[in-house]
Structure formats: C-alpha cells, structure tokens
Image (tube, grey):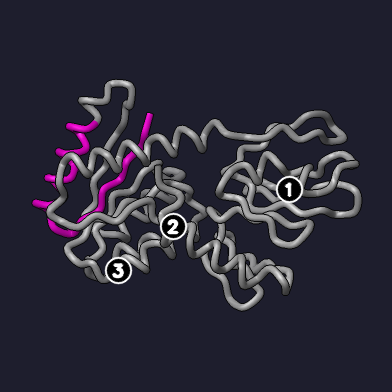
Amino acid sequence: MLRIAICDDEENQLRKTAALLEDYLRIRPECSGQVETFLAGETLLKRAEAAGGFDLYILDILMPDLSGIDVGRKLRQLENGGEIIYLTTSNDFAADSYEVQAFFYLLKPVETGKFFHVLDGAVERLDRRRSEGVVVSTAAGPRRLLLERIRYAERVGHFVRYYCTDGTVDSQSIRAPFKEAVALLLADRRFYLCGASFVLNFQHVTGVQGQMALLDDGQAVALPRSAAAEFKKAWGNYWLGKEHLP
C-alpha cells in the first residue's frame, strides 16, 4: 500500500488535490493507497519522522514558514526516499526542485490527465525501486542488495565494498576488472563510474562542490580529480534533463 502525504497551506487547494488522488486510486485498483493531508510543512515533517516516512509527497512550494523546497530538503536530511511531486503557481523554483531530487514539478491549476500520468510514473518508479537489486557474493554467503539503498561502491584491495543506507557490504575477492564486477550497477542509469574503481548513485547525491560529491546522509565523498567535472555534468543532466523520468 502506498502512503501518500499532501501539504498545501490553502485548505481549498488541499481538498482539491486530495480529491484528485482519491480519484486516481479509485481508477487504479491495482494501486491501493492511504492519503494524509497537512496544512503546514512542520506538521508533515513531524508526522514523517514519527511514521518512518511516506512513499509519495505532493507538496506546494509557496507556503509560509517552511516552503515546499525547505520541506523537501528536510525530508532528504531524514534520509527519506519517498518521491516528491511539486505543485506550484510559480515557475521560478524548477531548478531548486532538482536539488531535493523531486520526481516532477507541475504548475497549478493542475490538469487531471497530466497529473495522473505523472503519478503513474512515480508509482512505477517506486515499484521498480522496491524490487531491483543485485546479488553479491560475500564471505557469509550470497547477499541481495537493493539498488536504491546503494549510495556508492568502490574497489578496496581485491574486493568491492558497497556503501548502503543500512551499512557496508564487502564482496568476496574479485578476479575481473572493477568495471566488470559492477556491470549490473552500471546497467542502471542511476549509477555512474568515476575513474577506474568508484561508482556513485545519482539518487543519493545532493550536490557537487569542487571535487566533492555531497550525499544525502551528510557525507562528502572525494571524486577522482580527472572525473569530477564530467561527474558534475552527468549528475546535472540526470536531474535537470529529467533522465530519471519514464
């Protein structure tokens, strides 16, 4: 079941968006869901932290106290992997929306068909993220890692170390070149090869400063000098170019 949160400081707009979501869930019987509404970002954040987050967030941007962009940033600081869709009357925040890894950005008034198409894409991506993974041979036996939980991987000596949202996993000794060892990661467009022995997941990168990739858990990972500029370009294209959308 999908857990969906809507946040808009205008009560009338909040009701309209909630009604659209209820209509969407009704005509997509294979997609069950529960919708919760919030008039303020702070209230939503408290609920998200207490409940372990939502799968999907529908956020207004222009709100008092905390804007929708502010809410998105704080959700990412909570390491919340839910998809974010922004609804707004202004086109001035499109660049800010990719900073918080928003799935889509729609202008009000929202056209029903377009909104449902975007929801279809978000649901498809959530389903894919929940199921896609790689099996890694470890000293303790095979271990299945979900791709969405892998922040980055690197060669350490003769094995590959996977840095995941729930800890690190070391493979058994590898005989193939690193690029071949992580071929299943590189087949997914979220992952990018930096240099000869380092792979980063764009989904977990919140920014690039010089030679440092800033991750959603607060880490700053050094990029190979020769790869930093190309990585920054590729990361920007991934979000600004909407390559992550269906």
Specify which label sits upstream in the sequence, 2 or 1: 2
Residue plotted at (62% across, 42% down): 187
> In the rendering, which numbered label is found on residue 6?
none
Q: Which residues are magenta?
A: 1-24
Classify mark 2: helix, strand or loop: loop
Rendered location of residue 31, percent (x, y) = 33, 26
> How many C-alpha atoms fall within 10 Å of the one at disc 3: few (<14), some, or many (≥20)?
some
Specify which label sits upstream in the sequence, 1 or 3: 3
Specify which label sits upstream in the sequence, 2 or 3: 3
Whether residue 22 is visible, yes or no, is: yes
Question: Is residue 209 toward the left or the right of residue 11 in the image?
Answer: right
Report which residue position mark 2 lands on.
Answer: 101
| Amino acid type of the residue that numbered disc 3 sits on in the rendered structure | Phe
> In the rendering, which numbered label is found on residue 93?
3
Q: Is residue 11 magenta?
A: yes
Question: Is residue 111 toward the left or the right of residue 91 in the image?
Answer: left
Q: Nearer the viewer, residue 88 or 228?
A: 228
